[in-house]
Image (cartoon, rainbow, N blue to C red):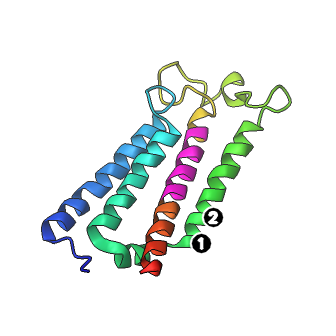
Amino acid sequence: MSEDMGLIVKTMARATIPLIGIFGAYVIAHGHITPGGGFQGGATIAGAGVLFLIAFGLREAEEHYNHKLYSVLEGLGGLTFLGASMLGLSVAFFYNVLWHKGGVFAGEPGTLLSAGYLPIMNLAVGLKVFTGLVSAMMAISLYRRWKE
């Protein structure tokens, strides 16, 4: 069975994969002021990984996928989320200390830097969701190939 999807599909994938990544990053960065956030943005960026696998095949995806790097990034996302949620533990779990104490992250409501550490939480969740979904997709793809 050939893994070659053809020139048109590969060309369109090369053009749209970066755009999907940029849109996912936008959804993550603006998750506290618009619908969306870390999970939705991470899943969107993982969709770019699915498109890469479909367009270029498993062999090419294997060459660009580093299991150890994705595992470390997934753990970093989880630890960042946990660490940020414990910043205000002296008051309450998930107490938004960066917003309540003022400074850079306590801007005017509705602006990008207006939610304290919620953008940091969205980034951590987005990183964890993206790396987890891509790792799961690669594991399923590799398992299927191994069974044949």
Query: What is the spatial separation of the Cα atoms under label 1 and label 2, in whole angstroms?
Result: 6 Å
Spot occupied by residue 144 in the image (x, y as percentages of width and height): 44, 73
Residue 68 numbered mark, or none: 1
Left-right relation of 141 to 105: left
Marks 2 and 1: in contact by CB < 8 Å? yes
Residue under the image location 32 percent in, 59 percent down: 51
Q: Secondary structure at mark 1?
A: helix
Q: Inspect the image, locate mark 2, and give the three-letter code of the amino acid beneath it.
A: Val
- Name the secondary structure under disc 2: helix
Which region of the structure is painted magenta?
A: 121-133
Tag shown at residue 53? none
Most common SS among magenta residues: helix
Q: In the rendered structure, which amino acid carries the disc numbered 1? A: Lys
Q: Is residue 124 left or right of residue 26?
A: right
Q: Residue 101 location, x and y as percent?
A: 72, 25
Instruction: Specify whether residue 123 is painted magenta.
Output: yes
Write down the residue under mark 2.
72
